[in-house]
Structure formats: structure tokens, C-alpha cells
Image (spheres, coloured by chain):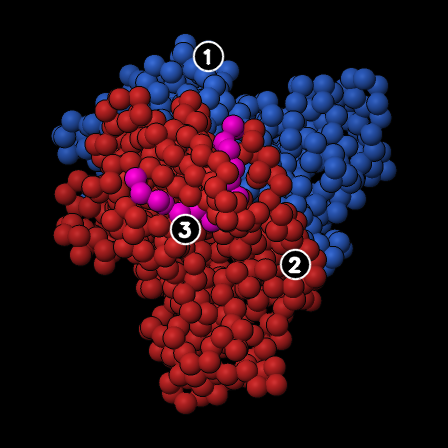
Chain colours: A blue, B red
């Protein structure tokens, strides 16, 4: 290892996923010289092993289910999807795991890319150990942004390595549908991958330790998704843990805590995420390697004013879009401080990621889709708000009945009774994925209920559930 | 004709479509005795001959088109829709043109239904000529609400009656797909019915007098819809008027102003609407029979304080959902005035239909869908706002590319530069129908652009176009 370069930048970004890319884009746009360091593919987890491939797998499954619920169309779609075509489509959407396009984009915005493993080396200093064996030193005049994201966590089961279990990476990049797939974990990744592979021809068994799926959403979300997965042919077992897992002659054998034995071709563990901060030199700046990095609302790490932690690593919301939001804010805050301008860190200011606390949206691309923003009823109550929640059966909305025969779904609106504003909304049902942004605007805009009555949903759309929720609130 | 009854109510509503039903519901809920008069089916045009059947016809066509754009699914859906199944489904959604369910609902909310033709007969008095030949007199203590809606207008072509042309009623209730259908008119009804019947097996020729389709929306809406209709096999001819139309041995023969001769099995005129006010006794209260009825924002007819005109008849917005909005406001205003409470008629007040001026949403259920709310760029400029419009190619949004292969669409946001709020938004593309409500909330809530940056769209949804529009505005 030889040290051949020492370069000075205004900003150094560790990690070139969507979050790092957005920080770099914003600091460059503000005229700050910026370097970005990436040890794998530019574009990150989301582009190659998460959002992008998972949605490329899921959209045909959901469209297939929708078609089967459409009069006049269902006779055509009784047969299975063409799984090979779906996988080829997924390969297109991941650029076949090549990052040329993203590298080109970095060049076009004037960000210097350093390939290799980046580590902090004391204040404002980053070393990059390149694939060529060379070691480069980068110095940041103003800020270093850690955007290294998270990785899947595997449970501590003896002999698990030999089983070669899937994580989200293998589940989104698999080259064929396994005949039988056990999915462990009922969160978003577990629910989505169970939906995708069941729809693509696998026989899925979903093992969920807790009482239900999607535990961070309103309880009916997980209930409706579990019901639909079961109807689609998956075997959903809640309150079930894995006691042991082995691979015998190629076959995965799972034994549950209830003593059930399940055989499968592959097993996916979707059981949580850990920050990718274990080997990035946090110890050189007084922080704990392997820890999540809590931040202020401008994404600054407390007591380390030149250090920003953006995206999954700060554990605020492990979602690409929310990380990109933080990235825009962090980039702007870095630029403001570099220019000596006081940052606008009041709530909803340009340099405060206020939405992280109040309005994180999420769409789970299952069938039915589950979408939420803001606080669930339980979260709002825990936070001490005086609230009322109103529910409505989405299947009773005219537009929903027209969208799909036998439409099943549910909506909930959580209202702050002091301020008469909406704190949270959850929609579960086919086709609600694009509906949630209306709720995001309402929550973020703190639009009073009285004003929301003037926001007329078009007839007959599923959005008319808004009217029903307002009526339910008025009459409750 | 004998006069057998004379009944006194607080409120009398003329017309039991969705608008009349909603006025009556609100006045009843406020404790006012309410009668409603209907000469046809309770539920009105929308339930039997407009929104409901048209969307029941369109949804399978759109789902079919979506399926054909979905990798892994398209090999299944090359064949045609089962038109008979779609028509049967349409029949279900119109309750086979029976209004028992709606009558039951009126009873359940305590509204008295009078079947027959209602006419004003001087101030606060309505006569009903029943199907039984009896004449009933209703007196309204507080208010009469005219909710009689509109009807299709046929052009004054000689001999047209003998051709038996379709209007929107026949187009939405037809018992089979005509082999060849000429559609005259490029507005919403023309565009939707051309889409529906082309998708259900007819060979459609669409004749549009003006330069393009959907003339009340941003120009690109009509362009994209015309392009897609043409790709679907329809013959779209703009700048074309009908010179003559005859029916010869069952075949419709159209001659255009350009001298073209087109043969068809049916012809639909979708060339405008007229108010159903010609025979409702307007002359007995000093108003012009057959005229539209302009109203104040509480839906009161100026100088006739006991008279309200709600829905299509006031010509503010010929849309069911906007009529229902007006109905809720009119019902509440009637109740407030009856109670001697000053109505809240300031902008966005509970008794002012402010959204009629600023935020009328509309979804055109074509393929692609076209959805808009608020002011178009041209409208905003005409209204004297200092504005900037930003556009974005919807096909470049990651969520759109995942939704459909080869996604084509476009979005426009019109921003008021004085107040930095959104005045209008248009989305055109597959799957945007549920997206427009986010814009409606933004326009109605007058959410500042700076705050909208905190409304994060979920990745990867089509809603992420919001981020692209905000970026385009920032960088413009």
C-alpha cells in the first residue's frame, strides 16, 4: 500500500448510494468541490439490491393480481406470469449491476469519484484504500458526510453460513424463482419478497416472530396483507421463530420453535438491518464503530460539527426517499455553513429534516399495497397528542369498486384534536400507492380539517376515501 | 290532473341526482324537513348514464392497456377483452337502471321523495306533476334548491332525429359494441367514449372541430390522448366538422366539412351540455327558462335569497364531485341561514364554494389518464397572476418506468411567483388518476413551495414527479 495522492475538497462524501449522490449533488450545486467514495457500485443498495429490483419484480405480480380482479380481462390472465421475462426486466432496471450510467452522472455534475474503501482518519480526513492497492488521502475543508447505509442482519443461528441463506440482496437479484422459499421476517422486506416470489411461481412459507406483518404500520395493514398472501397460496405463520436451519443434500430444513419442520430450496432472512459503520474509522473521531449515528435536524452529528450522517446510518427512517430528503437538506446546510450563513433549522426550515419526525411516507408494494405517512394512532397517543382516529372501508368507495371487483381495503386518518390537523394516514388496498402523497401534503402542510373539505376528490377515484374520512370525522 | 296534497317543508330540492341527494342529506342532518323531487331515476345522470357506467366500461380498457405494458404479463393479454363481461359489469354498477337502493337511502336519512316533474310556482312553491297524474304542491319555508343538472345538446343538423344519434346516455348504456362508431366532439365525453368503445372492439372515428382533444386542459393532455387513441387503432381527425349525417339502410353516413365520407353503425354526439332548466317554472320567479343559473359562493341565486342552484345548472363546473361539494356547502348555508346564523362566506369558509374558482379537479379516464386541478398556465396568465410553469417528462420518473414499460406522460406545475404557491397541476400518463389529489390538497391548502419540499414522495412511485417538478422550479 503506497500513499500516492493527497487531495483537498470542500466536502467528502462516504458512500455513493442515492443518499451520498444527493448530498454531493447539492454541495456541488452550491459551488463546493466534492469527492465521493464508494467501495461497491455507484448507485448503492437501492439501485441494485433493494427498491429498484424489488419493485421491478413486484409490479408485474401486482398488475397480474389487478388484472385478475378486472371484469372482461380476467379470462385472459388465469395463467402464470412469464417469470423469465420479469427477471430480464429486473435485470434491465438494475442496469445488469453495472454503474456506468451513474458514474457518468457524477462526472456530469462535477463530483470526483474515488473507488475503494473509505475510512475517517481523524477530523476532516478520509483515507481511501483503492482496488489498485493504493491509498489516497482526502481532506475536507468543510464537511464529511457519512452515507454508507445499512446491511441486512442475519440471526445468530449455529451453522447458518453453510446454509447460504438469502438476504435482501440475493432475494432481489436471484436468477430464477426457487421452487420453495422460506421467508423469515414480517417487515417490509419479508412481506414484499414473499409477495414477489409467490407471484413468480415459488411456494412461499412466511415465518413471522410477532403477532402480525408490517408491525410499524396500523395493525390492519399487516392483517390485510397476510390475508391476501394466504389467498395467493403462501403459508403465513405468525408467532413463529426459527429454532434451527440446515441444508441437507441441497434442501433447506427449517425447524420452528413450535417443532414444525419445513423443507425449502432457499431461505431468506429479512430480520433487520445494521449500520455500515463498523469499518469507517469512527474510532478516529471519538465515535463508536458499528453504531448508528444520531444527528440533529440538519443531519449534523452532535459535538462533531464537520461530520454529517445521512440516510440509513442515522436510523431516522430506513427508506431511500427519506434518505434523499435528508441528503438535500444536509447538502444545503453544509453549503450554508460553508458560506457563513446561519442555517434555517427552525421546524420545516430549509435546513431541518422536520419530516423525519412528522411525515415519513412509506409504500409497501404488496398486494394489497399498504401506504402510510405520519403517525399511527398508537404513535400519536404515545407522543401525547389528543387524537381521534377514523376508519373507512375502502371497498365501499365507488372508485375502489370500479378499480377492482371485490376490492378489499381500509383507510385510517388520525386527527390532532387540538389543532384540527391530520397527524397520520394509512391506506391499504389495491392501487393506493399513488394515493398516499395526498396525505403527505396534508400532514406536511398542516392543512386544517376545515380547509381539507375544500379539497374535492375526483369522482369516481379511490381518492374519494378522503371525503368519507372527513365525513366519518365530522359525524364521530 | 287533480291537486290532492299540499305539504310544507323547510327545504324542497328539485332533482335527485348526487347533487340533490347531498343537499337534502345536509339539510336533513341539520334538522330541516326536506322533500326531493325527481322525474327520472333517483341517483341521476351520474349513476346511470355518466360517471358510473362510463368508468365501468373504461376501467377494463385501461387495465388491459396497463397489462400490455407489463413485462411478464403481456403475453397473456394479447387477445381482446370479453366485451360481454364488461357490459354485464357495467349493468351491475348501474344497478340495472333501477333506483331501489338510492330510494332506500333517501328513506334512511328521512328525506321525502316526490316522483314526478317539479316546477317552481312562484316564491318558495313547487308543484309536482306525478306519474299518477296527480299534482302536489310543496311549500318551502326556507329554501328551494334547483339541482336538475344538464343534458346533452345535439347540433342543428337537418334530419338528425332520423339518424337516432347517440348522446352520452346511449354511449354509456349501449347493449353491445357497435362495429363502427363515429364520435363527434373532443371534450371529456368524446375522448372517454372513444377510448372505451375502441377498447371494447368498435372501430372508432373521432371527429374534433378544434385543434385538439381536451381543450380545457393543458395542450399536452389532448396531444398525448390523441396519440394513444391513434396507436390503439382509432382514427382521430382534428379540425373536422360534420357537414351532414344520414342513416341509409341502417348505416350512418357522415360527410365532413372537408368532404370526407365516413360510414358507421352508430354516431355519438358529445358536443356540449345545456341546463335542464327549460321547464321548471323559472319564469314564475322572474328568471329565464332554459338559462344557466349563476350563483354566489354559497350557491344562492342573486336577488332570490330563498333559491339555490347547485351542480351543473350553475355552470361553475360540470362535474359530479364538484356538484356534490357545492351541495354540501349549499346544504350547510341553507341550514345556517334557517337558524339565523350568519353564514361563513369568506374565501374557504364553510359556506363558500371557493374551490370552484381555484381548485376544480378532474380526471379523464382515457389511456393515458389525464388529470388536472386548479389553473392551467393560460388560465393563470389570463387571470393576471405572475406565474412560472415547469414541466417534467413523466416517463423519466423511476416509478413510472416501473409502472409501465415505455411509459409516456407529462406533468406541469403552475406556480404563483408572488405567493410561491401552486395554482395548478396537470398530470398525463398511465396511473395518474389517484395522483391528482395530492395536487388538489397542495392548491387548496395553499401550501408554500418551501414547505412542499418537505412532502417527500415515496420511492419508487409515480408521485416522485413532485420532486422533479420542485427541482425544475428551483433550477429554472
Q: Secondary structure at mark 1?
A: helix
User: Are discs 2 and 3 located on one and the same chain?
Assistant: yes
Q: Position of residue B353 (x, y in %)?
A: 29, 38
User: What span is in magenta?
Assistant: B109-123
Give the mark count: 3
Q: Residue at x 75, y 43 (%)?
A: A202
| Chain of the residue on which disc 3 is drawn | B
Q: Verify whether residue A266 appears in magenta.
A: no
Q: Position of residue A445 (x, y in %)?
A: 31, 31
Q: Is residue A110 left or right of residue A220?
A: left
Q: Quadrant of residue A117?
A: top left
Q: Residue at x 45, y 34 (%)?
A: B6
User: Label 1 belongs to which residue?
Assistant: A381
Q: Nearer the viewer, mark 2 or mark 3?
A: 3
Gap between marks 2 and 1 measured at Cα? 48 Å
User: Label 2 belongs to which residue?
Assistant: B87
Q: Nearer the viewer, mark 3 or mark 1?
A: 3
Amino acid at each position: 500500500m503506497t500513499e500516492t495522492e493527497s487531495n483537498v475538497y470542500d466536502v467528502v462524501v462516504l458512500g455513493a448510494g442515492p443518499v451520498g449522490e444527493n448530498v454531493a449533488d447539492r454541495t456541488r450545486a452550491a459551488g463546493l468541490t466534492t469527492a465521493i467514495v464508494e467501495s461497491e457500485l455507484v448507485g448503492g443498495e437501492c439501485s441494485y439490491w433493494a427498491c429498484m429490483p424489488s419493485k421491478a419484480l413486484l409490479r408485474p405480480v401486482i398488475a397480474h393480481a389487478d388484472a385478475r380482479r378486472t371484469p372482461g380481462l380476467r379470462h385472459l390472465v388465469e395463467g402464470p406470469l412469464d417469470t423469465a421475462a420479469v427477471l430480464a426486466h429486473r435485470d434491465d432496471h438494475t442496469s445488469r449491476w453495472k454503474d456506468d450510467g451513474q458514474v457518468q452522472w457524477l462526472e456530469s455534475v462535477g463530483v470526483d469519484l474515488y473507488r475503494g474503501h473509505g475510512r475517517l482518519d481523524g477530523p476532516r480526513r478520509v483515507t481511501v484504500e483503492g482496488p489498485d492497492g493504493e491509498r489516497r488521502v482526502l481532506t475536507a475543508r468543510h464537511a464529511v458526510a457519512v452515507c454508507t447505509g445499512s446491511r441486512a442482519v442475519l440471526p445468530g443461528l449455529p451453522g447458518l453460513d453453510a446454509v447460504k441463506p438469502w438476504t435482501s440482496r440475493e432475494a432481489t437479484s436471484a436468477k430464477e424463482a426457487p421452487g420453495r422459499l422460506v421467508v423469515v421476517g414480517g417487515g417490509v422486506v419479508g412481506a414484499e419478497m414473499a409477495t414477489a416470489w409467490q407471484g413468480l411461481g415459488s411456494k412461499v412459507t412466511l415465518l413471522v416472530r410477532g403477532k402480525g406483518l408490517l408491525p410499524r404500520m396500523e395493525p390492519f395493514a399487516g392483517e390485510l396483507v397476510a390475508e391476501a398472501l394466504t389467498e395467493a397460496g403462501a403459508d403465513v405463520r405468525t408467532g413463529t421463530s426459527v429454532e434451527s436451519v440446515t441444508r441437507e443434500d441441497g434442501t433447506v430444513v427449517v425447524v420452528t420453535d413450535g417443532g414444525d419442520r419445513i423443507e425449502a430450496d432457499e431461505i431468506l432472512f429479512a430480520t433487520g438491518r445494521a449500520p455500515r459503520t463498523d469499518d469507517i474509522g469512527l474510532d478516529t473521531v471519538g465515535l463508536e464503530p458499528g453504531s448508528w449515528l444520531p444527528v440533529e435536524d440538519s443531519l449534523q452529528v452532535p459535538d462533531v460539527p464537520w461530520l454529517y450522517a445521512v440516510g440509513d446510518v442515522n436510523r431516522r427512517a430506513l427508506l431511500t426517499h427519506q434518505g434523499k430528503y435528508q441528503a438535500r437538506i444536509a447538502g444545503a446546510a453544509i453549503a450554508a455553513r460553508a458560506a457563513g450563513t446561519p442555517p434555517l433549522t427552525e421546524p420545516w426550515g430549509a435546513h431541518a429534516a422536520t419530516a423525519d419526525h412528522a411525515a415519513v411516507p412509506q409504500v409497501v408494494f404488496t398486494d394489497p399495497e399498504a401506504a402510510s405517512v405520519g403517525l399511527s394512532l398508537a404513535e400519536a397517543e404515545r407522543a401525547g397528542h389528543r387524537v381521534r382516529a377514523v376508519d373507512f372501508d375502502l371497498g365501499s368507495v365507488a372508485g375502489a369498486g370500479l378499480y377492482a371487483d371485490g376490492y378489499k381495503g381500509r383507510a385510517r386518518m388520525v386527527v390532532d384534536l387540538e389543532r384540527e390537523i391530520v397527524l397520520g394516514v394509512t391506506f391499504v388496498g389495491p392501487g393506493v400507492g399513488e394515493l398516499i402523497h395526498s396525505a403527505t401534503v396534508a400532514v406536511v402542510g398542516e392543512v386544517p380539517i376545515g380547509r381539507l373539505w375544500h379539497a374535492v376528490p375526483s369522482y369516481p377515484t379511490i381518492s374519494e376515501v378522503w371525503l368519507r374520512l372527513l365525513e366519518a370525522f365530522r359525524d364521530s
